[in-house]
Every structure is written in structure tokens, then in C-alpha cells.
Amino acid sequence: MEPPEFLRFQHVVHAVARAKTATVPTERMYSMSLGSRQGNAHLHWHLAPMPPGVPSHLQQFHAVMAENGILAVNNHSQATLAREIRRQVQI
């Protein structure tokens, strides 16, 4: 990305992170950029809110690794949460 595109993208990532923080209890927000030019070239961010009270040794990469467990969330709950976050986004 050229700098203006990257900065605009980062502005959106920041707005979504703030919206998530306003929607779910969050002690800190982890932001991860993943992507590759090989194969299916793409760029995306993961925003992972860390709830209050999680011990430090269970945070960072440990918290986002599927082998350490995943939250079972049904489609209805996920759609409701997405709507709540969308309402909070201020771009």
C-alpha cells in the first residue's frame, strides 16, 4: 500500500478497535496484521479484545492460538455482537 492508503486503513482499524472496546469489556486490545503476497495476496487485521483479569501468561499469542481453546459462539450471538460493534464505529 502507498502511505495514504495505509494511513486510511489504519484509521479504520483504530475506529473498529475503539468500537469493540466500547462494546465488550476490554483491558487491552491486541492488533495483529497478517497477510502474504504469495498465493492469495491479501492484507487483514485481527483485533482481539482481552477481557479484564486474564493473567499475563495467558495473554498475547497464547490468547489467540486455537489450540488453547476457542469460544463457542452461535450465529445469532455473533450477528448481534457485530451489530453492536457497527453502531459504535465512528469513522
Image (cartoon, grey):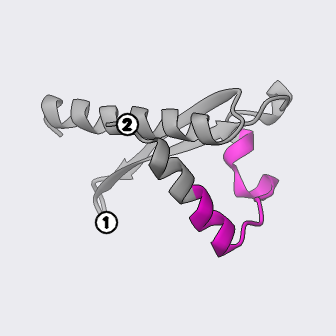
- Which residue ends up furthest to the bottom in the rendered image? 75
Question: According to the image, label 1 marks what residue?
Answer: 39
**Residue kind at label 1, given as amino acid type:** Gly
SS class, disc 1: loop
Name the mark on residue 79: none
Q: Give the quarter of the figure containing the C terminus.
A: top left
Label 2 is placed on what type of residue?
Answer: Gln
Report the front residue among 11 and 65. Answer: 11
**Does 10 sit above or below residue 37?**
above
**Residue at position x 14%, y 31% in the image:** 4
Label 2 SS? loop
In the image, is residue 12 part of the stretch drawn in magenta?
Answer: no
Residue where numbered disc 2 is placed? 90
Identity of the residue drawn at 51% across and 38% down: 19
**Magenta-highlighted stretch: main secondary structure?**
helix
Residue 83 locus on image (x, y percent) = 52, 58
